[in-house]
Image (spheres, rainbow, N blue to C red):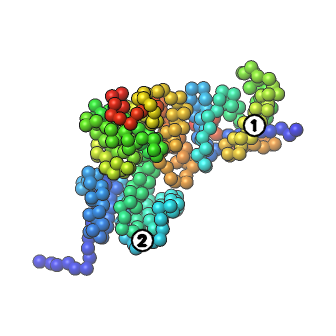
Amino acid sequence: MAEKYIARSKAIAARMLGGEMMVMSAVDSTFFTLNEVASTIWRAADGRTPLSEIVAGKVCQEFDVDPEQAQRGADRFVNELSQHGILLVSEQPLVDSVPSAERP
Amino acid sequence: MTATFGTIAPETISIEIGGKAIALRTQDPSFQRVIENRYAGFVKTSAAPHLEFDIDLCEPSESSADDALEVRMEAGDWVLQWGDLRANWNPDTGQGHIRQSFSPYSIDCVLRIAHGLILARQGGFLVHAASAIRNGKAFLFSGISGAGKTTISRLAPPDATLLTDEISYVRRDGNRYIACGTPFAGELARVGENCAAPLSALFLLEKGLQNRIEPIHPTEAIQRLLRNILFFADDPELVKLLFQSACEFASLVPIHRLVFVPDQRVWDIIR
């Protein structure tokens, strides 16, 4: 299976509040509240680190979760946010600079 | 003595909301009177305007209120189109033009959008909310249509000053926010008082079986606030600004859920 690289879109506004990340699309104003696990993936979405590495190195290290279950959940999360243009997904590293996780 | 004929000096009316005046110039004395009556209490003769509009009146077209409102930036100008209303203004020079039929509602539309855009750059916003001042403190009551904005306004006791029953003007002032009166009336059909006070709380309205104030999770509060902020421009940068403004607002102003029975006792818990 091809590796997946994820990067935060520049067309979003985001802010961390009480352990949750709020993300709003600047294009269609869709609003998401990310839980702690999703926030961890969000912060690590630098366009250079493969998603599998984020899951193994961040999610599974910081949370008590089965690796396969974590990978499936991460795939679903990435798929949903990418449909709204909030996360960019590629099979190659995304070389453009990625905006700050909180104050784009 | 010199008599002049043929040229009528356009009459200028300055309408000041939230301390920001917008000047309207029209050649038509009867339309001038319509504007003066519509915005009574907000007309200022000496205020230096933030924006100045020349108004040209045209015949009404077959457009309807269901026409889509469009606000966009075009070659440095904001352009607003809605039915037979077309307005454009340059935010740098402060000069603009309105072409509309003989209707005060078109002016209302221009004022709301112009103020919304001005406020967005300054950390404030217009929000679907009733607002009132009591004991020197301002309170916002926000909610979608039917949530109770007009009801809570109608129930306000005599010692409360109503700022609006429909659209509240919120501006940033250092580490606090100020609620200002607006002439934008809802079902109450009553123009708000032209005064202002520091905001003490935002209540998100819900009708219920008893009066109570409930805490609300911060992220839900921000999401609900954002839903009620008026914003029309298709401009991602301004959307980002409003998101940040809503977050800042929520960090400085208490936000609660106000469940209320539609009778006057609800005001006993708003102080």
> Which chain does tag 1 point to?
A
**Residue that appears at 26% across and 51% down:** B41
Camera sees residue B3: yes
The CA span between labels 1 and 2 is 52 Å
| Quadrant of res B252 | top left
Q: Amino acid at mark 2?
A: Pro
Residue in the image at 45% along x and 44% along y: B146
Picture coordinates of residue B197, whole percent (x, y)? 32, 37
Per the rendering, the mark at residue B103 is none
In the displayed structure image, the side of residue B25 where residue A74 appears, left or right: right
Above or below, comparing residue B244 to residue B237 in the picture: above
Neighbours of disc 2 within 10 Å: few (<14), some (14-19), many (20+) = some
- The crowd level at tag 1 (other Cα within 10 Å; few <14, some 14-19, many 20+) is few
Q: Residue at x 72, y 21 (%)?
A: A62
Residue A48 placement (x, y as % from top left): 76, 37
The front one of A32 and A43 is: A32
Residue furthest left as drawn: B1
Compared across the picture, whether B96 is left or right of A64 comes to left
Helix, strand or loop under label 1: helix
Outermost residue toward the top in this view: A64
User: What residue is pinned by disc 2?
Assistant: B60
Q: Quadrant of the C terminus of chain B?
A: top left
Up/down of B133 relative to B46, above or below: above
The relative height of residue B233 versus residue A61 in the rendered view (above or below) is below
Pick out the residue farthest to the right: A1
Is B233 positioned to the left or the right of B129 in the image?
right
Please state which amino acid type lies under the numbered disc 1.
Arg
Camera-near label (1 vs 2) is: 2
Question: Label 1: which residue?
Answer: A76
